[in-house]
Image (tube, rainbow, N blue to C red):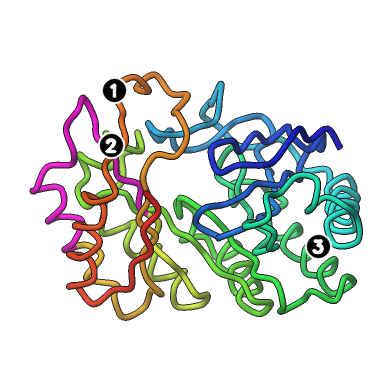
C-alpha cells in the first residue's frame, strides 16, 4: 500500500492504494470508509459531466476487466482493512466505519462488458468474508444503460445481497442535462430508466447542484427538476443532493463554484415538499 496520511472527502485519488481496480475513500455521502471498484481504468465514460473530477476524461468504454486481478485486489484489501492496521493508519477517528463497497470510479461502471460477472464475483467474495448482507453494496451510475436487460438482471442480483443504486439525475430539461452532463437525452426516457431500476433494487436519485459563472440554477430549471422527480416519489428511496467537494478536471472548471449549504438546504426543503426524503451534502 502507498497511502499517505489520512484519507479525506476532498481527495478521492483512484491511485492512492497502488491497486488497479480497488481504491479506498472517505465518503461524505456514505458516512465513512467506502471501498471503490473502478472498472473504467482508462478514464473513459459515455457522459462528460462538467463537474467530473476525473483527469483526462475521454468518451468511450472501459477496457476488458481482468477478473482475476480484481478478485485478488478486493480480497487483499478486505483482509488488510478488516484484520490489519489500515483503519488506524489512514482514517481519522470519526470516519472509522466501513460503510460500503461501491461500483464507482473513473467512468460509467455498467458500461464494462464484464459488469455482470463482477457483480457475481463481489457476491462470492463477500460470502467468503462473511459479509454478505451485512455490508451495503452500492452502484453509483449515470443510469444510461438501465434499459438493457443484462444490466437490469445484475441490478436485481445486487438487490439480493443488500445492494443499492445511486442514479444520476441532475436536471429536469433536455437543455439543462446537455449543459451539465454533455449528453443529448430525453428527460422522460431517463426517468423510465430510473423507474426500471427502482422497481427491482432500492434506488436513490443523486443530484449535483453548483453555481456556473457565479449564478445558481435558474428558478425555471429548479421547477422542471422538481416536476420530474415528483413522478418517481413512490418508487425511489429519496434524493442525495450534493454540492462540489473537489475541483472539476473538465474545461468548465473555472466557471464552477460551490453553492452555500443554506442554498442547498432551501432546495432540499422544496424536494421534501414533493414527498421525498433528502440527504444533503454541501
Q: Nearer the viewer, residue 172 or 259?
A: 259
Point out residue 199 in the picture as x, y percentages from the top left corner: 45, 78
Residue extent of the magenta highlight: 207-227
- Label number found at residue 178: 2
Instruction: State the separation of the CA atoms marked 2 and 1.
Output: 16 Å
Under tag 3, what secondary structure? Answer: helix
Q: Residue at x 43, y 66 (%)?
A: 204
Q: Nearer the viewer, residue 252 or 156?
A: 252
- Comparing labels 2 and 1, the label whose residue is closer to the camera: 1
Query: Position of 25 compared to 49: left or right?
Result: right
Point out residue 236 in the picture as x, y percentages from the top left corner: 38, 74
Q: Earlier in the sequence, mark 2 or mark 3?
A: 3
Query: Any magenta on residue 217?
Result: yes
- Label number found at residue 121: 3
> Which residue is disc 1 drawn over?
255
Q: Earlier in the sequence, mark 1 or mark 3?
A: 3
Point out residue 216 in the picture as x, y percentages from the top left corner: 18, 38
> Which residue of the protein is positioned furthest toward the left in this rendering?
220
- Comparing labels 1 and 3, the label whose residue is closer to the camera: 1
Under tag 2, what secondary structure? Answer: helix
Q: From this view, report whether residue 8 is shown above or below residue 58.
A: below
Under tag 1, what secondary structure? Answer: helix
Amino acid at each position: 500500500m502507498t497511502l499517505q496520511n489520512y484519507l479525506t472527502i476532498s481527495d478521492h485519488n483512484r491511485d492512492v492504494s497502488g491497486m488497479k481496480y480497488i481504491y479506498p475513500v472517505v465518503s461524505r455521502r456514505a458516512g465513512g470508509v467506502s471501498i471503490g471498484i473502478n472498472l473504467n481504468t482508462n478514464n473513459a465514460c459515455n457522459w462528460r459531466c462538467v463537474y467530473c473530477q476525473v483527469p483526462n476524461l475521454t468518451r468511450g468504454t472501459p477496457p476488458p476487466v481482468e477478473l482475476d486481478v480484481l478478485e485478488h485486489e478486493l480480497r487483499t484489501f478486505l483482509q488488510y482493512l478488516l484484520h490489519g492496521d489500515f483503519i488506524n493508519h489512514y482514517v481519522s477517528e470519526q470516519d472509522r466505519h466501513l460503510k460500503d463497497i461501491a461500483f464507482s470510479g473513473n467512468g460509467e461502471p455498467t458500461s464494462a462488458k464484464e459488469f455482470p460477472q463482477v457483480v457475481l464475483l463481489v457476491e462470492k467474495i463477500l460470502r467468503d468474508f462473511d459479509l454478505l448482507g451485512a455490508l451495503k453494496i452500492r452502484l453509483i451510475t449515470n443510469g444510461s444503460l438501465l434499459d438493457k436487460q443484462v444490466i437490469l438482471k445484475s441490478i436485481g442480483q445486487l438487490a439480493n445481497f443488500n445492494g443499492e443504486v445511486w442514479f444520476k439525475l441532475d436536471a429536469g430539461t433536455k437543455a439543462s442535462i446537455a449543459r451539465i452532463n454533455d449528453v443529448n437525452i430525453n428527460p422522460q426516457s431517463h426517468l423510465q430508466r430510473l423507474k426500471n431500476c427502482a422497481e427491482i433494487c432500492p434506488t436513490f436519485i443523486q443530484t449535483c447542484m453548483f453555481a456556473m459563472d457565479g449564478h445558481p440554477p435558474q428558478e425555471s430549471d429548479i421547477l422542471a427538476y422538481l416536476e420530474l422527480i415528483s413522478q418517481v416519489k413512490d418508487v425511489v428511496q429519496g434524493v442525495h443532493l450534493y454540492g462540489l467537494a473537489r475541483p472539476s478536471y473538465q474545461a468548465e472548471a473555472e466557471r464552477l463554484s460551490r453553492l452555500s449549504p443554506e442554498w442547498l438546504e432551501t432546495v432540499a426543503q422544496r424536494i421534501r415538499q414533493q414527498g421525498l426524503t433528502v440527504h444533503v451534502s454541501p
